Image: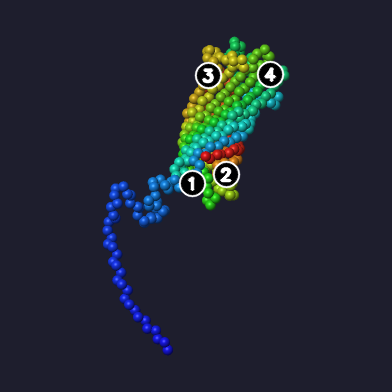
Amino acid sequence: MLAVLLVTAPLPAAEPLPAVGPPLDMGPDVALPPPLYIPDPAGTGGFAGMPPNAAAALLPDWPRWFAGANGLVMTRTLPAGAATMQPLAGTQLTSADAAATWPGGVDLHIGRWFGDRQRHALEFIYWGVYGIGGSALTSAAPPAIDAIPQAPGATIGGLPAAAFLAAAAGQQIARSDVINDVEINWLYAPATRPEFPPRQRPVNLIWLAGFRFFEVGDTLTLTSRPGDAALSPALFTVATNNNLFGAQVGAKFDWRFLPTVRFDVVPKFMIAGNAITDTTALATAAGTPAVFPGGEPVRVHSQLGVFSWLGSVDTGLAWDVTEHWTLSLGYRVVGVGNIAQADGQWPVVIATPAAISGIAAGSSTIVHGGFAGFEARY
């Protein structure tokens, strides 16, 4: 048998480590490296040794500006009509016969997001619809239409106003309304990048608050064609204008139900001051004014200040074609309360200036219609 003999020898003693002391002084022109300790990247301090603002510089270059345009087709509801003539053979025109039509309009907006995460934005909006209204007419042979109002004692070009308003050969009632809206809104989004939410977050909410101006202009014009064909037609006009202004609050809700398609709802509400004006006048189509017996023209301008309310909601679909372009379509409804409308200012008899002075408020209207357009982000 073989035997193995192991012989162990002691290892040489290790040299002691050098003592830890202050770093060597390498001179004023040599910068010391940063410490090797790296804190939690999620902390507020970021990475050690990272230059200031480097974290913001590493964020994606998201678009900050947004702007868009929509075409509008809208109408509005009307109050109960006021009679514009005495009944004749079963026919009687009213201001409601000048029905609201569906004219076109425009909707423009522009805004900008602020901050690294783009949670705040300032937005400017304008939209308007022009020429809402139609007309209705009737005629009589022989001339027998008695207009409402009559103006006993008033004259037009030296002739009694009755020569133009009583026993007329024809009458037309026409309406022309205008809607204007101006808004400046501050937007706040609890989530990051709200103007283009990521696909993993299908629901998004933005709060808004701002200032809004909303105008409802309502003009009714009665044209009375005298029985004497040599006379110019008489025009009786009632033009009422509501100017609502005040602070509003609202929200924008988005639900992405397809990868690139969103359903959105934008409700807004405000209690507004309303500076109402009304101008009522009687003249001929040639421009000759009617005058009262005392010599004052049959033209009175009235003003009234009240509180009104406004609530609106936009519902629609948005297709995010790319991160920079979106196509959208939807429907807008705006309800306005405690306003004045021309139908409610229509007089029956004009004997003195007081008959066409003052403004009666308390009515309401709903402006509604569709929109379609685009938004660009850059």
Task: Say which residue appears at 64% left-offset and 15% top-offset.
Answer: 232
Q: Which residue is mark 1?
A: 60
Q: Is residue 53 visible?
A: yes
- Residue that badge 3 annotates: 353
Q: Is residue 202 left or right of residue 51?
A: right
Q: CA distance from mark 4 to mark 3?
A: 27 Å
Residue 54 position in % (x across, y down)? 42, 47
Q: Give the CA distance from mark 1 to mark 3.
A: 68 Å
Indicate the amino acid at tag 2.
Answer: Thr
Dots 2, 3 in contact, CB < 8 A: no
Image quadrant in which you'd find residue 335: top right
Of all residues, the one furthest to the bottom in this rendering is 1
The first of marks 1 and 2 along the sequence is 1
Determine the residue positioned at 57% across, 46% down.
262
Name which residue lies at 56% across and 32% down.
128
For badge 3, the amino acid type reads Pro
Helix, strand or loop at mark 1: loop
Residue at x 49% of width, y 27% of height: 304
The answer to whether the residue labelled 4 contacts the one labelled 1, judged by CB atoms less than 8 Å apart, is no
Q: Which residue is mark 2?
A: 322
Q: Nearer the viewer, residue 293 or 284?
A: 284
Q: CA separation, marks 2 and 4?
A: 63 Å
Q: Nearer the viewer, residue 67 or 310?
A: 67
Q: Which residue is mark 4?
A: 169
Dot 4, crowdedness within 10 Å: few (<14), some or many (≥20)? Answer: many
Residue type at mark 4 is: Ala
What whole-number distance in Å separates the C-alpha atoms at marks 2 and 3? 62 Å
Q: Label 3's element?
A: helix
Q: Residues within 10 Å of mark 2 (few under 14, many from 20)?
A: few
Q: Nearer the N terminus, badge 4 or badge 1?
A: 1
Residue 242 spot, x, y in % from top left: 52, 29
Please tell me whether residue 29 is drawn above or below residue 288 in the rendered image: below
